[in-house]
Amino acid sequence: MKTNSYLLSILVDDEPGVLSRIAGLFSGRGFNIDSLSVASTVEPDVSRITMVTKCEPHIIEQIKKQLHKLINVITVNDLTDKKYVQRELALIKINARPEKKADILRIVDIFRCKIVDVGLSHYTIEVSGDSEKHDAIISLLNPMGIIEIASTGSIALARENGKK
Amino acid sequence: MKLTGGQILIKMIKAEGVDTIFGYPGGAVIDIYDALVKQNGLNHILVRHEQGAVHAADAYARANKSVGVALVTSGPGATNTVTGIASAHSDSIPLVVFTGQVPTALIGNDAFQEVDIVGITRPCTKHNYLIKNVDKLASTIKEAFHLARSGRPGPVLIDLPKDIMQAQIDFTEPKEISLKSYKPNYKPNKKQLNKVVDLIRRAKSPVIFAGGGVILSRASDQITRLAKMADIPVTASLMGLGAFPGSHPLWLGMLGMHGTYRANMSIGHCDLMIAAGVRFDDRVTGNIEKFAPEAKIVQIDIDPTSIHKNIEVQCPIVGDCKAALEGIIQLMEDKDTNDYKNDRKVWLDRIEEWKSTTPLRYEQDNVVIKPQFVIEKLYELTKGEAIITTEVGQNQMWAAQYYHFDKPNHFITSGGLGVMGFGLPAAIGAKAACPDKLVVDIAGDGSIQMNIQELMTAIESKIDVKIVILNNQYLGMVRQWQELFYDKVYSSTNMENAPDFVKLAEAYGAKGLRCTRPDEVESTLSEGLETEGTVVMEFAVDREESVYPMVPAGGAITEMLLV
């Protein structure tokens, strides 16, 4: 059966072990986590987990209900079919051979990225945007020799009146 | 008022209306045991293995319709509770398990008898806690009891570091529990209830399928009233036995792998199934594609995850079973015209035919005792009034088939997890909750040996239980599968090397009786049941008797192997 990608925004109690409960739920029931990002919110004692999961359509309902059943989960918001803003952040370290430096700077400029570290033989580029933007810049930079990449999972918030 | 952590613990358990707890001491919980012996009103039963404590607390909760409590030490004491907790989790039984823990300063240092029991039990508890601050102790205990008994009940574990139990504070009553992230929905949707009434009135061949949730929500009366008012036959899962009277003409018998012919056929041919408090376990459904293929399914459950999990249903109702069934009954009373009842006769006649052509059956000769015969005689002699606990395997299935439970909370078995060794400690727990009731553990020779040490608990605490061992000198259920599906290769299921159960009973200080002849079954049972104190009755039964009907794993439930 075909699988879809779902974007969940989950508010949880900021307590030790909460992430383990969620990770354990996914591993125990054979669900997949594609990416995960956890951070505090403006409310004290509440954290937001933004998660991307790939599964068949009927499984996502179980995932949402099972998540909600965890005592420390406050709300589960499925953003997939809503209007939302989504960002990922990546740091890309790339070979900066003299003959390629101009190309790299042009790409950085076009994608409105920043160079955050400059060495004798490499640049480190900061990219923020949705996952399509990341895929696009990586495919352009790849031929020039990407050394390593560190990236966050997706974070997302619903827009005002966030229904499609 | 200055109290120690240990004293607060006891005070809070008492405040929840629990009068008996089951436990086993150890280094990390000495302070609690010291406080326990210096108080009145909370009875402690010393088990002989921590697993026994949890099973006993589980049965106490079921027999008493309250929350069961177990208390154990850190490390191995805590890990020994895991099977019991997992069983209670599977069966949605309200428990609070207190485990000792090394002092907070040592946590994470691999101290003596340290284990991360909160980490270990995360997947098999409804919720669990590690207390790091004595100020949070009372409120956490209160919250744990609230979680254990509300919504879909389940086991909750609290890990108690030794220094927290020693610490002294000014005790203040905790506030009422209000959790922003936990608000079970009890009230069913009225529109859905109306839909059910409509479905019932249009159905030609309806069936009610009751599960453990009916017993947990105390909705037996509602199930019975609904069945009677609309002439709907009733089946149940193993966990639902007793939800509907087993002696009533509308009773179909148990459903599933070892369900009755008529129950399984009814599900195969019904056009409406009203499923209440069930989770459509694979032992009930068999092949899902062929489960109730012609039926519209109504599913009532307090837990939204139960709905659409294994089976697609047309009319889901999230809410308390009792409230939902009561709502349906009210609506039926308001607008019932009885005009659909003529159709029912055809359906009920068809069921009657299944019943008369293919009843549960076995043949008792005058040479070898049949296990089913022992249970039928037990049923007659106890007039169906006993609380029955079971071990797991053939003994459990024969108990389910031949002891016709008329009332809820009288059949106590490890349904979901299927724990061998459950029955004896469970019998102790049930008897502790209901001292005026006769409590009988129906056991096999294999599983009774898994927690046989609890005989000492029964003797010491003067909790009189009767144990019926159906001794076929095999792990009978596995042997049965080997006979049917593994060319009779009886790998590791022969139990001929067994202790002398009569002498074993006597060694513990119980009475032991042995019966080897069919014509002595009744007199042995009578003697055992009438003898005061704990009695072990061993019946040498037909070695290769199997449980029928049987649906081979993964098969359609209408395709049964009969005798």
Image (spheres, coloured by chain):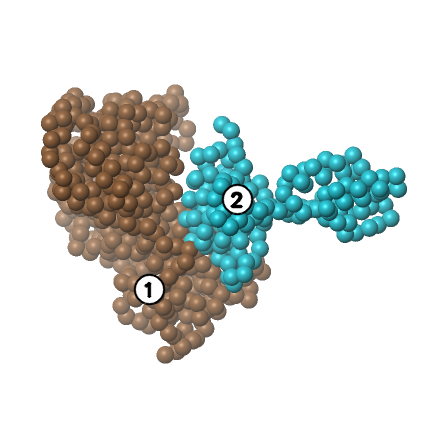
Chain colours: A cyan, B brown
Residue B212's disc number: none
Are discs 2 and 1 located on one and the same chain? no
Res B448 visible: no
Percent position (x, y) of residue A24?
A: 50, 46
Q: Nearer the viewer, residue B154 or A139?
A: A139
Q: Which mark is residue B13?
A: 1
Left or right, B449 with respect to B469, comes to right
Badge nearest the viewer, 2 or 1: 2
Percent across and percent down for residue B317 are 30, 42
Please name the residue that numbered disc 2 is placed on.
A83
Amino acid at dot 1: Ile
- In this view of the protein, can residue A65 be seen by the observer? yes
- Classify residue B415 by image quadrant: top left
- The residue depicted at 59 percent of the width and 46 percent of the height is A86
Instruction: Identify the residue at image location x=82%, y=39%.
Output: A103
- Disc 1 packing (10 Å; few <14; some 14–19; many ≥20): many
Q: Within 10 angstroms of label 2, few (less than 14), some, or many (20 or more) residues?
A: some
Residue drawn at (39%, 55%), measured in percent from left and top? B182
- What is the count of numbered marks? 2
Q: Secondary structure at mark 2?
A: strand
